Amino acid sequence: TMTLGSCLFIIGMILTGLITELWHFYLAFGLLLGISQALFLVPMIPAAMVWFRRHLGLGMGLIMTGWGIGPAIVTPLMGFLILRLGWQWTFWSTAVVSATIMSIMICLFKDRPIDRGVLPYGAYPDDPVEDPQPINREQVTLFAKHISSTFAYWNMSSIHFLGCVGHAVILVYLIPIAVQEGLSLLMAASLLTIASSVSVASRFGAPILADHYDTKKVMAFFYFIQGITVVMLFWTGDPWLFILFAVIFGIGYGGESGIFPILNRKYYGQAPVGSAYGFQLLGAGVGMALGGWIGGIIFDITHSYDLALVVSIATS
């Protein structure tokens, strides 16, 4: 699955370098790279849940830290490369370097600990021994059908959807809001880098906290921080207040998504959860898309982002 995702990523990046029309951008960057991202995103978590019999919070913290560091580094780097190399060569060189790194890492990756001849992290000697045979697809399908009829299955996807609407509004519209308040474009863009950088700490810490304490309370805390911080944007005009907002918002934003695998483990144990987590990420993806779109529609109608900020607060 990840090999297919890497192939689509390379194709999408190369085609993005060739765009001459806006619809080309939607097709190459939006559709192809969107699909490739999903093909990487969805299998990674169930794989981590197989490799970590216990201390899953640590495993998720490490993965989520990577997801935080990546955007924090690459966003300014891509801007620098576009200025130096131009649009086309930036995307082409990124495709070549990324494809090389991903190919090596996918070759090193194993689906299950038994494929490498080791035990899952945190396994005890008296734990059930992992079956060396391939997973029974009929049993997986039957289990997926069973859990899809439970309240938790739909509720967790709904929570992910609402949380992603909440932070997508901010991630997409923070820059125009800041520019509207008098910040330079460079300063406004740096706010996202600050939020992404700060989110690394909570991405690492939130799953570990959820693994050791009341998962629901930990999740509620980070959602609350993500939502209540947005109130600042109604009165923020000073650059330092925008920076303070980015720091506090980054804490809530980073802690939001890494807790879902912990919930899946507590609900479903060691059972295959690819379908459940995939459905939760479907909710997240729809939420990101809706949040990123609705703010612009609201601004076109009201000539203000205030109502979009209310939506962000309410959904979080």
Image (spheres, rainbow, N blue to C red):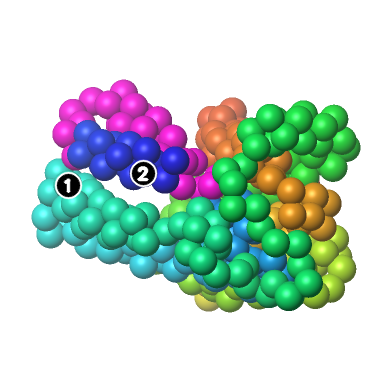
| Label 1: element kind | helix
Q: State which region is magenta.
A: 16-43
Instruction: Classify mark 1: residues with Cα within 10 Å, few (<14), some (14-19) or many (20+).
Output: many
Q: Quadrant of the N terminus?
A: top left
Q: Tell me residue 86's x, y (percent).
A: 13, 50
Q: Choose top left, top right, bottom left or bottom right for residue 227.
A: bottom right
Q: Which residue is mark 2?
A: 3
| 63 or 22: nearer the viewer | 63
Q: Is residue 254 visible?
A: no
Disc 1 residue type (three-letter): Trp
| 117 or 161: nearer the viewer | 117
Q: Is residue 26 visible?
A: yes
Q: Are marks 1 and 2 in contact (CB under 8 Å)?
A: no
Q: Choose top left, top right, bottom left or bottom right for residue 58.
A: bottom right
Nearer the viewer's eye, disc 1 or disc 2? 2
Q: What mark, if any, has residue 92 been given in the picture?
A: 1
Disc 2 residue type (three-letter): Thr
Query: Which residue sits at x=22%, y=34%?
Result: 15
Q: Identify whether 253 is placed above or below 7.
A: below
- Left or right: 240 as drawn, with respect to 139: left
Query: Which residue sits at x=46%, y=47%?
Result: 40
**Cα distance, mark 1 to mark 2?**
19 Å
